[in-house]
Amino acid sequence: MCGIVGAIAQRNVAKILLEGLSRLEYRGYDSSGVAINNETGVRAHRAVGKVQALKDKFEAMPLDGKLGIAHTRWATHGKPTEANAHPHFSGDDLALVHNGIIENHEVLRRELIELGYEFRSQTDTEVIVHLIHNALKTEPDFLKAVKNALQRLHGAFAIAVTLNDENERLIAARKGSPLVVGVGIEENFVASDQLALLHVTDQFIFLEEGDVVELTRDAVTVFDENDQVQDRPISVFNHNVDATDKGEFRHYMLKEIYEQPKVIAACLEGRISDERILTSCFGANSAFLKEIENIHIVACGTSYHAGMVAKYWIEDLANIPCTVEVASEYRYRKVAVPKNTLFLTLSQSGETADTLAALRMAKQLNYLTTLAICNVPSSTLVRESGLTLLTNAGAEIGVASTKAFTTQLTALLITSIAIASEKGELSAAQQAELVTALRSLPAYVDAAIKQDEAIKLVSEQFANKHNALFLGRGPMFPIALEGALKLKEISYIHAEAYPAGELKHGPLALVDETMPIITVAPNNQMLDKLKSNLQEVRARGGELYVFGAKETGFEEAEGIYYNEIPWVEEVLEPIVHTIPLQLLSYHVAVVKGTDVDQPRNLAKSVTVE
Ligand code: AGP
């Protein structure tokens, strides 16, 4: 989704801004731009496509200066064209970049046109820059004029704005979209994501809802939503892993798939002892675990699939009802909240607009408490939730979520066991057995990754496919959904997932020799039923791709491609069985030559509704 970078320094900021934009490329975008404020005015370059196209423009015609703003745009209002790319201008000397959506932009646009403003783009953003320009007519102080203009906006925004007469300060603000200040020595920065600034600083101030910030070279002044100056704390980024380095891997996605044993171990660290879950991982007061009588899980996309798996664990282990819902639906309906219900959100980024809106709505309802399972400690979701369990996966750059998903599952299994134990549904021995299984998880995942070469060979069969069906039963159904999502996201092959038992209720009509059917076979009481469903497919000429442990008894045969997954305890199957599906979609995308890490039309973090 859109990205912002801004800088005010004693040195030329053009390279800093361009490098910042490159670091934001993973979020997904379709055009980019930079405006530099110097003695000659505010000048900009914009380009459609990759940031490299913008860099080429800088190469051909350099713009130098000590103050600037930059942006990667993911089109919402208006096509991805140069005219719609940010920065947007009012006149020649006021430029602005914006993330988010201005919901009342049509009314404001009409009003501004009546005032004589001419619009050069189709974006909602352009109203903001003209509003500030108009505010400057009655309020000559730049900072105050920006604050006045922001009062008129409905919707979500993070902005950075620069005015030529004001080349000693840069103004930025956030409401509904993330923004972070990077603190340097005699230079300061602003960005929508701290990763964009790791080449210039490791000190960050996370702005809060409604904050407006004035950056000079020597100072950062934050005003809260009541216009009071606030001393926001500075956090230091931990450089242990620089996620922006692909290392030996061809794509971030592959690197992140291979990181899973390590990050799952990091997710377990400090959360389990030899025989039990350490409930202190939920914070000092974990008494709420005993009180839970219901759970509502709300999330989007891959995170939603993780929630669907958790329902099986929660109901099976803890014996309490659990509902799972996509955030974009939950937030717009009347929800009945049974007594002592835990509201649980799942999010890699912690900035997904729908999930945040659902949390804010839930906080007005009668929930026991809110718990976020999230990967980004500094995210809005973490800051606004009552309790947090971090997944510790490290920054995930590939748009297609991989390690974030398996660490979410790990955190959810920890949570399910903790609740079950606290509610007396698990004996100490049962808990110890589950914890022992959890300890083996990184090694199991490592063994599953070792099938990479074999899966790569299978993937070649998909080069000419246009459709695929994924089947699963029980907790393997959400894993099938996740497998289908991965395949469509990065290889653009149309893929659907069904509980295998539903096949004959409709989708079987689609099956013929052109339709590959992918399934992960559990080694449990559902296996025989699954095998019968697969017979139905073979009888119609469908090609089967089966991933399962040796113990499932599957073998290669005509029309059946079999890949072995290591045997694991049943409770861990959804996590380990995810790995071959991730590898399959990765290799299919490579065979098809798509943009694996930044698939078309998608954004890493969906910060608009
Ligand atoms: C996953 O591959 C997707 N790119 C997407 O579905 C993602 O999981 C969804 O947008 C939710 O994001 P979040 O986990 O950051 O909230």
Image (spheres, helix red, strand yellow):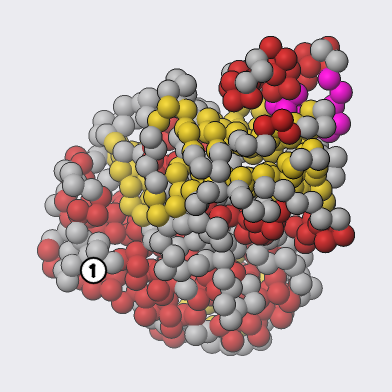
Q: Taken as a whole, is the magenta stretch helix, strand or loop? A: loop
Q: Looking at mark 1, is its residue's CB closer than 8 Å to ligand 1?
A: no
Look at label 1 and name its amino acid: Val
Q: Is residue 551 visible?
A: yes
Residue range of the region highlighted in magenta in the rendering: 117-130
Toward the viewer: 601 or 431? 601
Q: SS at mark 1?
A: helix
Residue receiving disc 1? 435
Q: 155 above or below 428?
A: above
Q: Is residue 355 visible?
A: no
Percent coordinates x, y for residue 512 in the rendering: 74, 69
Q: Quadrant of the C terminus?
A: top right
Q: Quadrant of residue 233?
A: top left
Q: Is residue 296 magenta?
A: no
Residue 317 left/right relative to 54: left
Residue 277 left/right relative to 200: left
Image point (85%, 15%), residue name: 116
Residue 82 left/right relative to 195: right
Residue 304 left/right relative to 412: right
